[in-house]
Amino acid sequence: MKSNLMKSTLGVLAMSILGLVATGAQADWDRGSHGYGYGGHAYRQSQLFSQQINERQDRQMERIEAGMRTGALTRFEFHALMQEQYNIRAMEQHFRADGMIDAREFQRLDYALDTASRNIKLEKHDYQERYAYSPWRN
């Protein structure tokens, strides 16, 4: 009787240990040692994508603000360009909802940033000035 109780106890203990080992292996797989999840190649690539996107948006915001300071942008143009930047930021947040930005999402954001950059250039150099039609200007 004691022998059967001991065997069943050891069996349950062995199954518990195997379950814990399997769970640990699964957790390690999810963590990214195989290229997925946090710490893996895809996660690092996503971080690089995010960094590039944020740097481009920062430069574009500086260009928009400089255009407003110099008077090269009208208030309407300024607001339209700021709305475009807001839409790109919302798209980025939508793509990042799953925790990562993949290559296809990065391409879409990159294309949107290219378009925004062209729009900034066109609006700053379209010879419309904020005070061009002011009665106080010579």
Image (tube, rainbow, N blue to C red):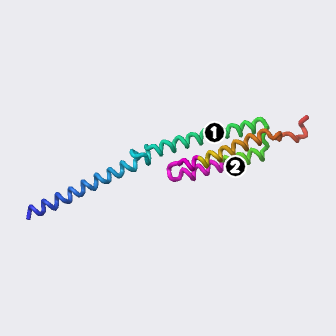
Q: In which quarter of the image is residue 50?
A: top right
Q: Which range is magenta? A: 86-106
On residue 58, which mark appears? 1
Q: Is residue 43 left or right of residue 72?
A: left
Look at the image and say whether residue 31 sits in the magenta stretch: no
Whole-percent x, y for residue 19 in the image: 28, 56
Which residue is painted at 32% across and 50% down in the image? 24
Q: Which residue is drawn at 45% across and 43% down?
A: 41
Q: Is residue 7 left or right of residue 23?
A: left
Rendering coords of residue 111 (x, y %): 64, 46
Residue at (58, 40) in percent of width and height? 52
Q: How crowded is mark 2: few (under 14 residues within 10 Å), some or many (20 or more)?
A: few
Give percent across and percent down for residue 138. 91, 34
Which residue is label 2 attached to?
83
* Distance (Cα) linking label 2 and label 1: 15 Å
Q: Which mark is residue 12?
A: none
Magenta stretch holds residue 93: yes
Secondary structure at badge 1 equals helix
Could you tell me which secondary element the residue under label 2 belongs to? helix
Q: Position of residue 26 (x, y in %)?
A: 35, 52
Q: Which amino acid does label 1 sit on?
A: Asp
